[in-house]
Image: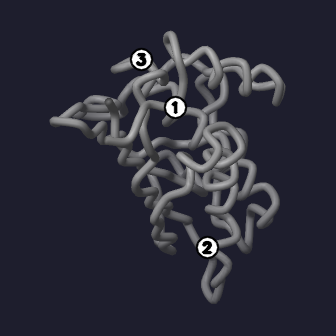
């Protein structure tokens, strides 16, 4: 059996976040009829997280037109941080065994094909914070539009102990 990431209550994860100058935000309230995260068996399924910071989107529009790849990458990182907050609120980060799957959606300008580079922002955050247990399978998908005009959205499946 795989073991959780850390000891008591995820102290190592919180210390790593602090070392990186990051703090878990408040869970982003749902925009419609769903919950931010749900547990089923040994898995937590995190609803698509927008890159909200203090209740606002830092940028809107399409990556490759209104938003640069670098800005999109930072937004994907915000999405990942919001996903960690949703997991923490539901079960606590100390119970995370593995980030299993990340699906990233990028509102893309016509002809833009750099979705993987954008979603690397989320993947790198999970790896930086959780180490080997943050490495995951992933899809990076270009889409026409996202809720509220967000450039990026990320959903996550995590295994828990």
Q: Which residue is mark 1?
A: 5
Residue nearest the observer in this picture, 122 or 26: 122
Q: Residue furthest front?
A: 1
Q: Residue furthest bottom?
A: 111
Q: Which residue is mark 3?
A: 89
Q: Is residue 136 above or below residue 128?
A: below
Residue 157 position in % (x across, y down): 36, 47
Q: Is residue 39 left or right of residue 153?
A: left
Are circles 1 and 3 on residues that touch, CB within 8 Å? no
Q: Is residue 148 above or below residue 26?
A: below
Query: Residue at 48% of width from left, 72% of height from top?
Result: 141
Residue nearest the observer in this picture, 105 or 58: 105
Q: Where does the C terminus fall, quadrant-wise?
A: top left
Query: Residue at 77% of width from left, 66% of height from top?
Result: 69
Task: Judge depth for marks 1 and 2 and give the one in front.
Answer: 1
Upstream in the sequence, badge 2 or badge 3? 3
Q: Is residue 51 visible?
A: no
Number of labels in the image equals 3
Badge number at residue 115 = 2
Q: Is residue 25 visible?
A: yes
Secondary element under disc 3, as helix, strand or loop, is helix
């Amino acid at each position: 059996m795989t073991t959780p990431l850390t000891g008591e209550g995820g102290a190592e994860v919180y210390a790593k976040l602090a070392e990186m100058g990051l703090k878990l935000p408040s869970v982003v309230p749902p925009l419609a009829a769903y919950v931010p995260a749900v547990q089923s068996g040994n898995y937590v399924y995190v609803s698509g997280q927008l890159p909200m910071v203090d209740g606002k989107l830092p940028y809107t529009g399409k990556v490759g037109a209104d938003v640069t790849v670098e800005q999109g990458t930072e937004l994907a990182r915000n999405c990942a941080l919001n996903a960690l907050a949703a997991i923490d609120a539901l079960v606590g980060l100390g119970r995370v065994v593995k980030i299993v799957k990340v699906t990233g959606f990028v509102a893309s300008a016509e002809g833009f094909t750099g979705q993987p580079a954008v979603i690397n922002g989320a993947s790198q955050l999970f790896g930086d914070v959780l180490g080997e247990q943050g490495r995951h399978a992933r899809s990076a998908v270009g889409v026409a539009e996202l809720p509220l005009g967000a450039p990026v959205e990320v959903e996550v499946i995590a295994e828990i102990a």
